[in-house]
């Protein structure tokens, strides 16, 4: 199966989303005081950074150019989370709600890209593994949100 520019564009979209998620998790880690939650967010940031590295390598492996940096929309979302947290009394709950919302958006993007059945098997496997890790993180975040409320 031939690697196409269309696949490269889709992987670049996920790459940028992972840059945004990594920065968002680091931002969330700085926002909360709870040491366990802080560590959880830092681990998620590392995971999303690893996803970005894997996507970059896959794009480069096929002779395409990976994009750098996050999006304006991602920066706005991170800044909104900080502002909202400052204005709310229960900051942990607000941060968790926003993180879950962002992860659900990521999950939807992965699901959309995985609908394309013209992906090489190695890319399909990588994307499914990343998608499943995001789903697992959402499930953990929901548990943390329940405990925080």
Image: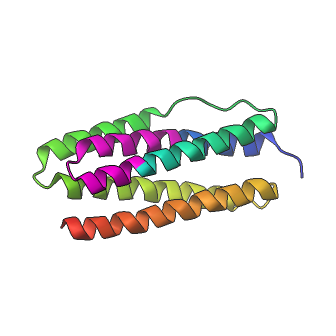
* Left or right placement of residue 78 versus residue 62 in this view: left
Display coloring: rainbow
* Left or right placement of residue 59 versus residue 14 in this view: right
Which percent across, then down, holds residue 4?
82, 43
* Left or right placement of residue 118 versus residue 11 in this view: right
Q: Residue at x 37, y 41 (%)?
A: 26
Q: Residue at x 89, y 52 (%)?
A: 1
- Quadrant in the picture for the C terminus: bottom left
Instruction: Name the image quarter holding residue 145.
Output: bottom left
Tell which residue pokes out farthest to the left in this image: 89
Residue closest to the eye, 142 or 101 = 142
Work out whether residue 2 can be spotted.
Answer: yes
Which percent across, then down, holds residue 77?
35, 41
Residue closest to the eye, 33 or 139 = 33
* Left or right placement of residue 116 versus residue 110 in this view: right
Which percent across, then down, holds residue 93?
22, 58
- Say how many tags the image has: 0
- Does the magenta run of residues contain 144? no
Q: Residue at x 57, y 45 (%)?
A: 50
Work out whether residue 95 can be spotted.
Answer: no
Which percent across, then down, holds residue 100?
37, 59
Q: Which residues are magenta?
A: 17-42
- Does the magenta run of residues contain 33? yes
Q: Residue at x 24, y 43 (%)?
A: 31
Secondary structure that dominates the magenta span: helix
């Amino acid at each position: 199966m031939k690697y196409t520019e269309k696949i490269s564009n889709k992987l670049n979209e996920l790459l940028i989303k992972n840059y945004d998620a990594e920065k968002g998790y680091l931002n969330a880690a700085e926002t909360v005081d709870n040491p366990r939650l802080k560590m959880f967010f830092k681990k998620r940031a590392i995971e999303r950074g690893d996803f970005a590295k894997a996507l970059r390598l896959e794009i480069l492996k096929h002779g395409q150019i990976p994009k750098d940096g996050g999006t304006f929309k991602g920066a706005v979302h991170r800044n909104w989370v900080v502002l909202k947290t400052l204005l709310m009394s229960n900051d942990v709950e607000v941060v968790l709600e926003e993180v879950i919302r962002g992860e659900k958006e990521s999950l939807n993007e992965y699901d959309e890209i995985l609908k394309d059945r013209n992906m090489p098997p190695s890319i399909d496997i990588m994307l499914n593994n990343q998608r499943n890790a995001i789903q697992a993180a959402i499930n953990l975040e929901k548990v943390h949100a329940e405990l925080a409320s």
